[in-house]
Each structure stands twice: as C-alpha cells, then as structure tokens.
Image (cartoon, rainbow, N blue to C red):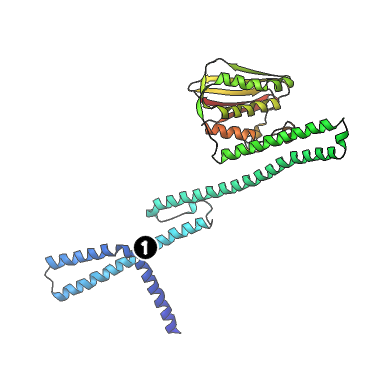
Amino acid sequence: MKQLKALDIGLRVLSKFKSNFAYSRIFIPEVFLLAASILLLLFIFIDLPIDGFIIFTVIAFSACIYILYLIGSKQRKEFEKISLAINSIRNNEYNNASDVKLDKYLSKLETDIKKMFIKNQNDIKYLKKLEQVRTEFLGNVSHELRTPIFTIQGYLETLLNGALEDEKVNRNFLEKANNHTLRLNALLNDLIDISMIEAGQMRMSFRYFNICDFLVDTIKEFQPQAEEKNIELIFKSAMKDLKLYGDKEKIKQVMVNLIQNAIKYTEKGLIEVSVIEEKGFGMISVKDSGIGIAEDDLDRIFERFYRVDKDRSRAVGGTGLGLAIVKHILDAHGTTIQVKSEPGIGSEFSFKLKR
C-alpha cells in the first residue's frame, strides 16, 4: 500500500516536473547558451583541471535544469490564472470587470481581459434586447395585420349574409372595408421600408435641391386634408433660394410623415412648416397646435409601433412605424430629429440638413 502511495506521489511530481518544463521549453536555448558561455569563459581564463571543469559543467547543467523548472512553474501559474479568468468570463461567473485580477506585471493583459469582459457583457445585453425587440416586433406586426384583416372580413361576411341588398348599409360597409385595405396597404409599405432600411438596403441619392420649392409642393398635397379639419397649414421661410443637401425622395418621406402626424393629432389651430438658415445648415421644422406629447413618452415615440395614445392612433389610421422610418432616414443623412412638445399646447419636430 505504501509502495502504491509512493508511486502515486512520484508520478504526480514527475507530471508537475514535465508540465513546468513544457511551459519553459521556449527558454531552453537561451538558458543553456548562457551556461555554455560561462563555462567557455572559465575554460579560457581560469586554469582548471579536467575534474574541476567536469564538476563545474555538472553544476551548470543542474542549475540550468533548476532555472528552467522555476521559469516553467511561474509560467504555468500565470497561464492558469489567465485561463481561469477567460473561462470565468465565458461561464458568466464574474459580476463586474473588477473581479478580473492578474499579477501586477500582467497589468496590460489584465486591462485587455477586462475590456473583453465588458464587451462580452455588452454583447449579451444587446442580444437579449435584440431578442426582446424581435419578439415585440413580431407580436406587434401580427396584431397590426390582424386588426384590419378581421375588420374587412367582418364587413364582407355581413354583406354576403344579406346586407349587400340593403342600400342603407352596403355602400357604407364597402367604404369602410376599402379604408381598412388602404390602412393595410400603408402598413405593409411601411414594413417593407423599415425592413430594407434596417437591413442596410436603403439606396440613397444625395444632391442639392431648393428646399423652399420642395416644401411648398409637399404642403400643397396636404392642403385638402388640413382644410377638411379647418386647420391652417402654412409655410414660412425668409430664404427663397436656399439649397440643402440630401436625398430628395427620402426627405419627402420624412416630411409626409411629419405633416400627416401633425394633421392627425391637431383638431384646431395652425400647422406651420418652416425652414431657417443657419451657419452651414438649414433647420426644417413642423410645428402644430395639437394634443402634444407627454415628457415620459418623448424618448420612445421613435420606437417601432410605439403609440402615445393607441386607441386614438388606430382611429386616425396610424401604422406606428412612421416616426421610426423618419429617424432611420435622418440617421442616414447624418442628422437627428429634435422634438419639443407640451400636452394640450402642441408639438414641434425639427432637423437639420447641410447647405
């Protein structure tokens, strides 16, 4: 039994010895070269008998072995610490970057591992957020598609069950069904737009264009809708020949969304579209006297399908994607959209384009 125990201890010592030498093997040429140089100097400058020289050689060789063992032991411990830190990061065993600790002379490597840990944590958070956004997006898409489809189905079933012959309701039901098909079409178009934008497939064509002429033409398209609600829709600018740089078609999409929203959420008063010249930029804004947006909602209105008032938004035909598309388009122009709003007073959306 004692012999087996001694053998086990011997095998472990041998294994540790071999392991240490494995970690120090890259230093073998340098260590033995140094020992050989010392022996050569002794041989040249000191008159030693052959026996003495042999003894010195054995001592030098033994010293080399011992030095390599110590170097290997230190290297092995360092690599084990590094491996432990990396595995702990991989297994999410650290709570924060300060838990990563190496020896002082490995401070640079410790800093790099901490950066890796922080990046790993950020990637995990991003993936979780992405998964949550994807789940919410699919749920919202399903709900938004289901509502008009079920409504259209209901009107058509009612008509087929006899209402088609009733002149008092048939046209009304058909008009309502048609309105929901238009809403469904708008939703699908917005879904296609935002999918292409987020997939990086949005094609941009930048050029200079007269912003005043552009805004006047855009506003004219919405005058009938504004007049129908007795809202005054005006354009204000001191610069008639101001030219700005951007994708004209994409900026048209931005303005359509902003003006449509202003009309939808304004019951009375004024909507003012303006452009102001600034140093190197032109500031475009759409200001209304509508219901306004609460401060808590301002940071979220550009999220897909986020609505301040869901019932009202659906009643006026919003898809919940318009402002998300606006944000993406302006991001592609290297600018951001600013919002000022006060409930009951109105809202102002503005952004800059380069001159």
Residue 229 can be seen in this image = no
| Residue at image mark 1 | 74
Closest to the observer, 57 or 291: 291
**x and y percent of residue 249 in the render?**
57, 28
Quadrant housing residue 348: top right
The percent coordinates of residue 187 (x first, y second) are: 67, 36
Q: Nearer the viewer, residue 244 or 105?
A: 244
Residue at (50% x, 29% y) in the render: 206
The residue type indicated by label 1 comes to: Lys
Residue located 39% across and 50% down the image = 108
Describe residue 198's horizontal placement relative to residue 59 as left or right: right
- In screen coordinates, is 121 left or right of 10? right
- Secondary structure beneath dot 1 equals helix
Residue 314 occupies quadrant: top right
Where is residue 19 shown, x and y percent of the image? Answer: 38, 68
Q: For the point 69% across and 35% down, which residue is it?
A: 185
Q: Position of residue 125 (x, y in %)?
A: 56, 48
Q: Is residue 129 above or below residue 278?
A: below
| Left or right relative to 145: residue 22 | left
Q: Nearer the viewer, residue 324 or 38?
A: 324
Image height of 65 relative to 352, above or below: below
Residue at position x 61%, y 20% in the image: 217
Q: Is residue 120 visible?
A: yes
From this view, report whether residue 252 is shown above or below residue 148.
above
Label tally: 1
* CA neighbours of label 1 inside 10 A, class few (<14), some (14 to 19), many (20+): some
